[in-house]
Amino acid sequence: MNDFLFTQILTELEDAVGRENCSVKEIDKATHSADFFWLSRMWVDRGRRMPEADFIVAPKNAEETSKVLKIANYYKIPVTAWGGGAGSQGGALPVCGGIILDTKRMNEIYEVNTEGMYIECGTGAIYKHIEWAANERGYATMHYPSSLTCSTVGGFLAHRGIGVVSTKYGKIDDMVLKMEVVLPNGDIINTSATPKHAAGPDLNQIFIGSEGTLGIITKAQIRIFEQPEERRFRGFLFRDMTSAFNASREVLQKFKPSVMRLYDEAETASLIKKIVGVAKPGAFMNVAYEGPRELVEVEEKILLSIFAKYGAEDLGSEYGEKWWREKITFFYPGHMMDIPQMFGTMDTIAPYDKIEKIYWAMKEAIETKYPFAKFIAHFSHWYEWGAMMYDRFIIDGEYVPKDPVEAMKLHNEIWTLGIRTALANGGVVNDHHGVGIKLGRMMKEQYGPAMQVFEALKKSLDPNGIMNPFKLGL
Amino acid sequence: MNMTDKSKNIVDNCRFCWMCRHVCPIGNATGLERNTARARAFGVSLVARGATELSELSDNIYECSLCGACTNNCVTGFDPKVFVREVKREIVLEGLAPAYITDLLMKHAESGNIYGAEVPGELGALACESADTVLFAGLDAWAKTPECVLSAMKLLSSSGRKVGLVTGDSGFALHFLTGETDESREAALACSKTLMAYKTVVVYDPCDLALMKHEWREWGIGTPECISFNEYLLSLVRSGALKVKKGNTEYMLQDSFAYARELDDCKSGRELIDSVGTVRDMLLIGKEANLAGHLVMAEYMPAVIEAVAKMRWRDAGNMGGENIVTECPQEYAALKATCPEGCRVLSVEEMLLENM
Ligand SMILES: Cc1cc2nc3c(=O)[nH]c(=O)nc-3n(C[C@H](O)[C@H](O)[C@H](O)COP(=O)(O)OP(=O)(O)OC[C@H]3O[C@@H](n4cnc5c(N)ncnc54)[C@H](O)[C@@H]3O)c2cc1C
Ligand code: SF4
Ligand code: SF4
């Protein structure tokens, strides 16, 4: 872009959001150029610069957002929303330059409504901050991802995120009542007064998971819950995963625990041993159940009797409580994988008849083709019909090519193989981290002709293709 | 860029970690991505890899309050303050400090304090010659909240103890602005010489005390027998020398980050409140204390410090608090300037005085 046009656009953006909320400083551009995506981290670790936006713009509300999108549409420049930048799929990376629309000034908590049981907030609010607002009034959001402290409400909505007590309380798409969205043309819309209706398809669900490709979510009503009277934990050791799946499916026909986490033998022997201290061979499972004390008592009885039937060793409550206390410790540097290692989480979801098959197929495919790769998994969000697998591959630094281009090729090859194997065995491209630029190419493989529904939406809402180009396969 | 291995290690770990962003008072007030420990580390890591220039980071480095909320939150124990201080020194030594920082340093060179204020009274001029215990009021408190220092003296004199007043420059502001430089060490040394003449030094500003207890010692500068103002007041209350009355007022404590995190004292302020009223807590207290103001930063980024203080008033309001009690002049000034109608901010000495 030439200097003249650049300055012209800059002045218009400054007019839209205020001069102090529009930056072209190098530090701001660099800071918004790498997210949690391994490739972006590796790239800058090797002394390269990632693609950067030309303008970093931070609107305060839907009205200012609307002005920014109108400017972007007129000049046909890309707009990429950036919430916390803690996404792992490169969703917030401004790969084509243009505008980064940082949502964090839209962080107002407008209302904590304890009658309607929701918080209305700007989507730039850090989720932990709305949790605090709920806690201050004696309530809780019950959305506890490991990135609770670093990601925004909008980011979780845009990637269809999930937290650790989801089995009882649901995913982010179960947590939202209503949203305000700014469409690419600058129109401000509200989805609908409540989510569960028969007034046509649910508009919420069109924008949830759309990763900033169809518009910017600017406000949301997020559910809150009563704090449970009691939350109890129980750790178990299964001899293998099959018995754990059978036992868990049976439990879920009776009641919904809040936390259910089953670790494969490899993860039990590595992470769980290191952080929680379980040193025996087998598949560790941690279960929490919560609510009114009387119900918890009954649930505990059911759980213990079903798990005993499947041969689970009852490890008592200590490991589970330790896991709860340490649940985000795993994610601090020094406790998890880091560069120079290469790693990635290929979470997928499937019904019980397929999920274990997917696990073994992916493990075999990756470990056979890449013998230097380690494949570990846990299963942490459960339904009456199936479960989510949070599987990771890890390659130690000595096997990772030094040349960043070669490292990128290896990375993408492994991902393609892993996701293709998941799809071939009945899984999906992703469970809760989203698609971003990392997995965009796999969307057509999953959806086939169904992809035209997304493409049609994209075409009609964003005819100039300015919204987060090359993400979500759109 | 010169950096110790310790700093390099912190930078390389923080640069891709977002875990502590929610507690950063500056990031929360500005909403800016660059106001996080990770963004700051990320910038430094780019400089270390030759991918950008140090000059590009200057402003961002000065946006950190060194409050240590991130450090406290870090499960692994990384301390971003370490590299921020080192990079600040590098920025100053390389002549890359922003103009608003060099202006403050010039003022310090000319007037002896960064505020360019005619401080009421020369160093030591107000000292009571015959007292072997003195209250040390650092230049920040003395220049910006003299009314509090005078209230503190009034309170102390009502205890019947002979306590003199010494004002001076502990080096806090210079250290904050330049890291460990000859100038900050020299200021500390001069202050130490004055204070060593007294048997006991009651330190008014916890930021000064933290500097004395940590940096002065590291620099090999003699530290007098020091006690925090809170601890000293508590001893007077406990012994009955300060006759306070217990009433029904509810006070919210704005924990000083220096007391809570650097001096490991989250209790004395609460105990003082308890002696005259009831503690009502807000979000982020004790070790997790959220900053509510900063005298030095208010000189060069007043709007941000105002926003930081307003956020604290919001926290207090959410829990129905009307009276905030501060332990530190750094926060008193900002909270006072932003005090909503119907609310009050009191320093601990003001709180005790209203309950005598
Ligand atoms: C340590 C760590 C642990 C994690 N654990 C979990 C976990 O337990 N569960 C989980 O679900 N995820 C987890 N994640 C992933 C990450 O937190 C989520 O993907 C989250 O949704 C990203 O939110 P963000 O605000 O950081 O978004 P960003 O990374 O900034 O953006 C993500 C995507 O959303 C778009 N976007 C952001 N805001 C808006 C908006 N207002 N409107 C429209 N589009 C928008 C962006 O353009 C981008 O495409 C983890 C990440 C980290 C770093
Ligand atoms: S201080 Fe700890 S939590 Fe904060 S960015 Fe650094 S490593 Fe992460
Ligand atoms: S020291 Fe305080 S201001 Fe600086 S990054 Fe940490 S939390 Fe933020």
Image (cartoon, coloured by chain):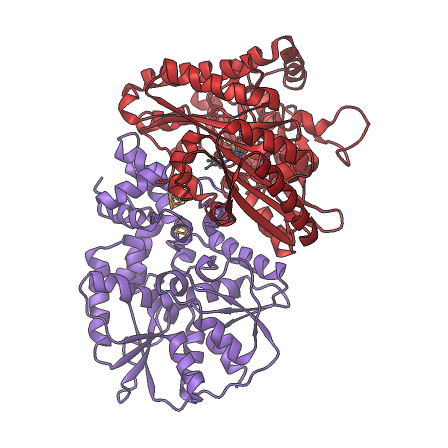
Chain colours: A red, B purple
Residue A324 in percent (x, y) is at 50, 46
Which picture quadrant has residue A265?
top left
Q: Is residue B2 left or right of residue B72?
A: left
Which picture quadrant has residue A42?
top left
Quarter of the image containing the N terminus of chain A?
top left
Q: Residue furthest left?
A: B220
Q: Is residue B175 left or right of residue B265?
A: left
Which picture quadrant has residue A179?
top right
Residue A410 in percent (x, y) is at 36, 16
**B31 and A40: which is toward the camera:** A40
**B321 and A227: which is toward the camera:** A227
Q: Is residue A361 visible?
A: yes
Q: Residue at x 61, y 56 (%)?
A: A136
Relative to B73, say whether A411 is above or below.
above
Relative to A7, say whether B98 is above or below.
below
* Tag count: 0
Q: Is residue A304 left or right of residue B299?
A: right
Quarter of the image containing the C terminus of chain A?
top right
Relative to B148, say whether B259 is above or below.
above
Q: Residue furthest top?
A: A449
Residue B279 in percent (x, y) is at 55, 71
Residue A64 in percent (x, y) is at 62, 35
Q: Residue furthest right?
A: A198
Q: Is residue A48 left or right of residue A451?
A: left
Q: Is residue A470 visible?
A: no
**A325 and A108: which is toward the camera:** A325
Q: Residue at x 61, y 13 (%)?
A: A447
**B82 and A287: which is toward the camera:** A287
